[in-house]
Image (cartoon, coloured by chain):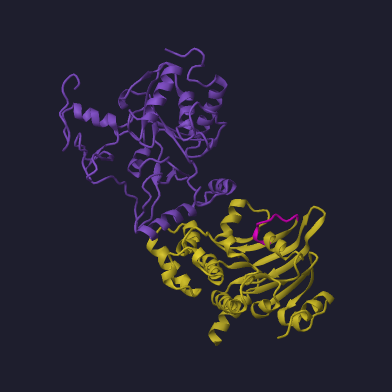
Chain colours: A yellow, B purple
Amino acid sequence: MGAVDLSIWAKVNADKPLLSVQGLSKNYGNRIGCADVSFDLFPGEVLGIVGESGSGKSTLLSCLAGHLAPDTGRVIFETAQGPRDTVTMAEAERRKMARTDWAFVHQNPRDGLRMGVSAGGNVGERLMAVGARHYGDIRATAVDWLGRVEIAADRIDDRPRAFSGGMQQRLQIARNLVTGPRLVFMDEPTGGLDVSVQARLLDLLRGLVREMGLSAIIVTHDLAVVRLLADRLMVMKGGHVVEQGLTDQVLDDPQHSYTQLLVSSVLQV
Amino acid sequence: MTDQAYNFAYLDEQTKRMIRRAILKGVAVPGYQVPFASREMPMPYGWGTGGVQVTAACLTPDDTLKVIDQGADDTTNAVSIRKFFQRTAGVAVTEATAEATLIQTRHRIPEAALTTGQILVYQVPIPEPLRFLEPRETETRKMHELEEYGLIHVKLYEDIARHGTIATSYAYPVKVEGRYVMDPSPIPKFDNPKLSNSPALQLFGAGREQRIYALPPFTHVVSLDFDDHPFEPSKAPHDCDLCGAGESYLDEVIIDDLGGRMFVCSDTDFCRTRCEAGHLGALGVPVLKGGA
């Protein structure tokens, strides 16, 4: 336990932020998508973004991942060649980063998977995209990753259509993590799954994040998810960040009236 | 006899000019799909409207035209396109590969080696090699633009996962000069090696999809594969039953309802030339001097 924790501690304590967001804004015409968002994400850290529907969480995530172009602001990512602003970098470079250093887990696995391609092909796609050309190696890696997300190796040639919702979501995660990204964006990764499957998925995610030393940004409206996964928490309302801090601190001692409302709305069973 | 009601080679000069510009751009950027304003032609889509327009734009009165359909000079598609240009352009036609200056082909490359100065025009149904993996045109264009070709290997991966070997046997994807991934039209993969370093100019026309692309002479073309599953051109493991050729691409012909079959060269000109030179296959009949 001690040794593992030490290595994580070393990563967490790296002095440079992996991702530094400064004054990010995105408007849809006159309506605000998200406004003036700034934060730093350090290596190995998991940041949760919570808020109600329409609060700008998904807009923010899309801007960070390069799916949407923000109106103003900078998104500085610590690449192997030093810090770079991903908003102004060439699209070719950004997309290359999106399939090597980044990963994006969609809420609906159908958006993130190729439904007409076998599970092995789905996992192998990113490998082939970065130049793997040895079928045996690609397949071995795919088998290994299916195992890590608890999908039996004999399902490797099945299409995702034949999988349950939870399995599809796990397959999507395997497909994204296979190239060893450093930063994972997750948009409601447990949305639409029943609670027992959610619990297993969270357990799996927590293990992978810790084991691989991943940094992650998780957008969700489920406070239980961030309680389990996130180190830090950002609460959004109406496009603005209304409160941020350590997860336990924010959830146990909410300062902003909206956060208090949010925390008190959770049903206690 | 030229049909005087039409301009030379059917299309008007402005249209031919537009097509030539697309061809020039295609030649300048080998493997890149150039959009062009494809016209309605007096034949249905799927019958080679793209190839016919490219041929019309390239023909000169001095050209000798050969048209083949799956290698054969005498099938419906080949005969009607050849007649079309005989009527509208009055050009000389031939069945001999070596005599032709312009060859329009449907899904084959002639067996006889092409030479400098010849033009080979392919009819293309679906020009986009990524189409069946990525249905969005905006996305496939972006993938070509940014050279994101991981997806084409997913197709080959799926082949091996399902069949144990790369089962794609026609329209086998190629990479042109280390840049663009290209669909070589549905030629058998047996013909793929002939795409590379050919002394002839190769033009590809897709009428319905409104795309033209090209391989200038001596362009380097590589068939995609995996390190442990290398590309292999394949053909039926037989000799031609008419001419005995062992290295030509073969058609399988059912000859009775008792399971009888024969294998013959798909390239009719190649087969006839060999028969006339005295080669004889297992079921062949010697050619009489002066025709049978």
Q: Nearer the viewer, residue B27 or A251?
A: A251
Q: Nearer the viewer, residue B81 or A123?
A: B81
Identified at 51% across, 47% down, the residue is B131
Identified at 81% across, 77% down, the residue is A261
Q: Is residue B152 left or right of residue A213?
A: left
Outermost residue to the bottom: A2
Which secondary structure dominates the residues rendered in magenta?
Answer: loop
Quadrant containing the C terminus of chain B in the rendered view: top left
Q: Position of residue A256 (x, y in %)?
A: 83, 76
Residue A108 location, quadrant: bottom right
Q: Position of residue B205 (x, y in %)?
A: 48, 33
Q: Nearer the viewer, residue A41 or B46?
A: B46
Quadrant containing the N terminus of chain B in the rendered view: top left
Does the magenta segment cover residue B7? no
Identified at 32% across, 43% down, the residue is B190
Q: Is residue A80 visible?
A: no
> Which region is colored magenta?
A64-71
Q: Position of residue B18 (x, y in %)?
A: 56, 26
Q: Is residue B175 visible?
A: yes
Does the magenta segment cover residue A66? yes
Q: Is residue B262 above or below residue B150?
A: above
Q: Is residue B89 above or below residue A130?
A: above
Outermost residue to the front: B257
Q: Is residue B222 above or below residue A129?
A: above
